[in-house]
Image (tube, rainbow, N blue to C red):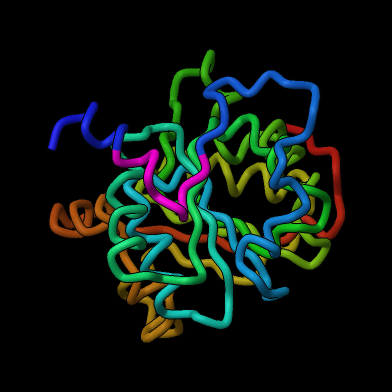
């Protein structure tokens, strides 16, 4: 199926929200603060920012029916995969949002999100692109605007560069770490957990190449400003 066909089918998915691409409106997105209503319950909501094809979001939702999940990505042809499967399987606790990650503060209200997953994001290694790194203070400030005070942010990556950068940010800002591993799939402490058993499309590829998968789960604890 070509991109245009996927874009047209995206319009029919009840689980997929597609606001204007840039969303420069001064008005809050109509679902901001109302996502629980979309799910029809008050269960905690977990966001996967930059979800790509969305299959990891869907896998988590199916493994944890007691939680609600939102996968967010700007690429319509990618997010189609997860949304299509969610529609076919009638998965009730998953939604998808096609939007730019840097604008995510416009789509979620304070304390609305209980956890954030950052799975294999672009490391943006060039210094001129560092503001686009999900672990940059800019993004942490945005995340803090809607993450519950006791909520967690989990970074999973194959990139030594991004992991080291993220750990440096965590240490400089004295952020609390709850889970840490430099080799998730060889870490006995994580065997049988979501961290080990749920894998993304990219993760499977990296594992086949012999790359080690690194992970850190940390908490902002209400902190709103961060330094690099």
Residue 47 point in image, percent of width and height: 58, 56
Q: How many marks?
A: 0
Residue 196 lies in the magenta-colored region? no
> Is residue 115 placed above or below 104 in the rendered structure?
below
Residue 211 point in image, percent of width and height: 24, 54
Residue at 48 percent across and 50 percent down: it is 96
| Residue 76 occupies quadrant | top left
Residue 103 lies left or right of residue 156; in this view the side is right
> Is residue 52 placed above or below 87 in the rendered structure?
above
Residue 50 point in image, percent of width and height: 46, 42
| Residue 148 occupies quadrant | bottom right
Seen from this angle, which residue lies furthest top?
Answer: 128
Residue at 45 percent across and 56 percent down: it is 156
> Is residue 31 placed above or below 99 in the rendered structure?
below
Q: Nearer the viewer, residue 223 or 26?
A: 26
Residue 123 point in image, percent of width and height: 44, 34
Image quarter where the N terminus lies is top left
User: What residue span does the magenta drawing correspond to?
Assistant: 9-17
> Is residue 75 placed above or below 144 in the rendered structure?
above
| Residue 23 occupies quadrant | top right
Image quarter where the C terminus lies is top right
Residue 107 lies left or right of residue 205; in this view the side is right
Residue at 39 percent across and 39 percent down: it is 11
């Amino acid at each position: 199926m070509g991109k245009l066909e996927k874009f047209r089918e995206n319009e029919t998915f009840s689980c997929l929200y597609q606001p204007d691409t840039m969303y420069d409106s001064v008005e809050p997105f109509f679902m901001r603060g109302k996502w629980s209503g979309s799910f029809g319950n008050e269960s905690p909501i977990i966001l996967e920012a930059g979800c790509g094809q969305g299959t990891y979001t869907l896998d988590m939702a199916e493994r944890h029916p007691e939680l609600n999940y939102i996968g967010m990505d700007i690429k319509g042809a990618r997010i189609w995969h997860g949304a299509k499967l969610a529609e076919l399987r009638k998965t009730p606790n998953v939604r998808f949002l096609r939007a730019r990650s840097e604008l995510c503060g416009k789509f979620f209200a304070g304390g609305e999100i209980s956890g954030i997953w950052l799975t294999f994001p672009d490391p943006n290694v060039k210094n001129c692109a560092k503001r686009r790194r999900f672990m940059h203070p800019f993004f942490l400030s945005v995340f803090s605007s809607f993450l519950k005070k006791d909520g967690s942010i989990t970074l999973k990556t194959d990139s030594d560069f991004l992991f080291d950068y993220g750990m440096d940010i965590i240490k400089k800002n004295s952020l609390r770490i709850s889970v840490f591993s430099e080799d998730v799939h060889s870490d006995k402490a994580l065997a049988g957990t979501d961290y080990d058993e749920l894998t993304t499309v990219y993760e499977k590829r990296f594992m086949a190449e012999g790359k080690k998968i690194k992970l850190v789960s940390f908490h902002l604890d209400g902190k709103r400003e961060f330094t690099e």
